[in-house]
Amino acid sequence: MHRNYRLLILLFPVVFWLLCFFIIPLLSVFAYSFIERGTYGGVQWNFTLENYQRLFDGLYLGILWRSVSTAIVATALCLLLGYPFAYYLARYQPKWRNVLLLLVVVPFWTNFLIRTYAWMLLLRTEGVLNSLLAVLIPTAGPVELLNTPIAVQIGLVYGYLPFMILPLYASLEQLDMSLMEAAQDLGASPRRTFWHVTVPLSLPGILAGSMLVFIPTVGAFITPDLLGGGKVSYIGNVVERQFKSARDWPFGSALSFMLMCIVLAGTVLYFRTLQGREDDGEATGK
Amino acid sequence: MKRLLEINIAVVFLFLYVPILTVVAFSFNSSEQTAVWQGFTFNWYAALFEDAALWRACRNSLIVAGAATLIATVIGTATALAIERHRFRFRAALVRCLYLPIIIPDIVLAIALLTFYVQARIPLGIISLIIAHGVFNIAYVTIVVRARLQGYDNSVEDAALDLGATQWQTFWRITLPLIAPGIIGGALLAFTLSIDDFVITFFTAGVGWTTLSVHIYSLLKFGITPKINAISTMLLVNSIVFILLFLRFREKKEKSPSL
C-alpha cells in the first residue's frame, strides 16, 4: 500500500471526530457568547458584547475569584498532605510502597459522585460527625458543616489528592539519594538540604501535581453543587445554572469561555516553567 | 522526623478511607435515619434488585461506555500509530489538539457539545452521548497506546519487512501483539472514565437516556436514603474487583517473555 494513502486512513477518523465534535462545538460556544438572549429563553442572532461586560460585574468577578482561590487553596492543601506522603514512600518504604500506592488509587477508581456523597453523609446536620459531637459534648448543638465553603474545600482536596501524590512520588522516587548525602557531608543542615536540594529536584513532580489538581478544581461542578448546596456560587455552578434553569445560554457561553482561558493560561504557564527549568539545567550542565 | 512522616501517612489514609468505609457500614444499617446505628440488615441490597429504574440506568451506562470505548479504541490506536510512525505536516498541531479535551474543564466540553447539538439539530439521546464520550476517550486511548509505541523501536518491524513479510503481515503479527497491552490498558481506562462520567452526560443525555451517574445524582438531589449507601458499596466492590483483575492481567503479561 502507498505510504501516504495509509497515513490518510489512519488520520481521517480522528481528524473528522475532533473537527466535528470538538473544534466546531468550541467555536459554537464562542459564537454563542457574542449573541443576545431571546425573550423566551432562546437566543437571538444579534451581535453584542454585553455578555462579556456582565462578566466584569462585581458579582461575577467575585465568583471567579472564589473559584480560583478555592482551587489554589485545594492545590496547596494537597501538596501539604501529599509531599510528606510521597517522600516517605519513596525514601523509607521499598517493601510496602506498591501496596500503599495502590491504596491511594483505589478511592480514585470509585465513582466521583459516590466519593462526594460520602462527605455529605459525614458532614450534614444529622450526619455522622454531628452525632459524634452530640455524644462527646451533649451541650453543643449541631454545627452546620454541609453547604459551607469549608465542605467544598474538603471535598475538592478529597477528590484530587491522588492526582498530587502520584506525580510527586514518581519524581521523588527517581531522586538520587547520594545528592542529599553529599549536601549533608558538605555541612548543610537537614532543613537546608531539603529546601536547597530535595525540593528543587522534585519540582517537576510538584508542578505536574499542582496542574493536575488546579485544572479540575477551578471548573468543578459536582463538589460545589453537592457539598456547597448551591448556597455558595462557584463558576462551574453558575455555568450550569445559565444552561439548565436560567436559560441564558449566551452568558453561560461567555462564562465558560472565560473558564477555558483561565485553564489554558495555567497550562501555558506550566509548560513555560518546565521549559525554563530545562534550559537552566542545560546552561549549568555546560 | 520519621515519626512525623508516619503520622502524616496515617492521617492521609484515615482521610481517604473513613468516608468510604462509613458509607459501607451504613449500607447494612437497619435504621432509616442514616446517622444512627440500629441493627444489621441486608434489606437495602434486596431493594436494589427490585429497582427497575436503577437497572435500566446500569444498562444505559454499559451501552454508552461500551460503544464509546469500542470507537475510541479503534480511532485512538490508529491515531497513536500515525503520530509515532509517520511524519506529517500538522503532527504537532494534532498532538496539541488531542490533549485539549482532557485539559479543558468537563463543563466547558459539555456545554460546547450541547450548543453544537442544538444548532446542528442532533437530537439528545444515545447518539449524542456516544459522540461526546468518544471525544475524551479517543484522547485517553491515544495517550496510552502512544506510550506503549514509544517503549520499543521499530527495528523489529523493519526486520519483518526485510525478511519478506507484507505490510499487513507485519502489522497483524508484529505491531499489534506488541502494542496489545497498551490497547487493552487504554480501553479499560476509557471504559472506566465513561462509566464514571457525570458532567458531560448530564448535559448531553437528554431525557430518555439516564445513565447510572445521572441516576445517582438525581437520587442525591432528592435526599439521602439508605439505598444510596447500598448502591455505593456495590460500585466500590465493583471497582476493587476491576483493579484486581487489571493487576492480575498485567502481572501475567510481565511474567511471559515480552518479545
Image (spheres, rainbow, N blue to C red):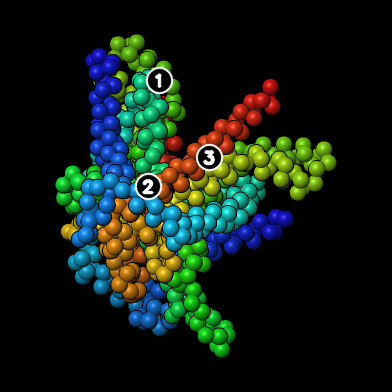
- Relative to the observer, which residue lies in front, A259 or A168? A259
Quadrant in the picture for the C terminus of chain B: top left
Label 1 belongs to which residue?
B154
Task: Specify the label residue A269 is tagged with.
Answer: 3
Q: Mark 1 or mark 3: which is in front? A: 3
Q: Which residue is drawn at 58% across and 39% down?
A: A204
Disc 3 element: helix
Chain of the residue on which disc 2 is drawn: A
Quadrant containing the N terminus of chain B in the rendered view: bottom right
Count neighbours of disc 1 (C-alpha within 10 A) and say few if under 14, some if 14 to 19, many if 20 or more: some
Residue A167 in the figure: left or right of residue B88: right
Which residue has dot 2 on it?
Answer: A257
Furthest-bottom residue in view?
A139
Going by the image, does B11 lie left or right of A4?
Answer: right
Please identify, in this view, whether the residue under mark 2 or under mark 3 is nearer the observer: 2
Q: Nearer the viewer, residue A140 or B41?
A: A140
Q: Dot 1: what SS?
A: loop
Q: What residue type is labelled 3?
A: Leu
Which quadrant would residue B206 be assigned to in this image?
A: bottom left
How far across and down, in percent of the image, does residue B246 sit? Answer: 39, 46
Question: Does residue A28 sit above or below A71 in this rendering?
Answer: above
Horizontal side of residue B31 vs A134, given as left or right? left
Q: N-terminal of the two: label 2 or label 3? A: 2
Q: Is residue A30 visible?
A: yes
Rendered location of residue A160, percent (x, y): 48, 54
Residue B60 spot, x, y in % from top left: 21, 55
Q: Residue under mark 1: which chain is it in?
A: B
Same chain for mark 2 and mark 3? The answer is: yes
Q: Three-letter amino acid code at disc 1?
A: Asn
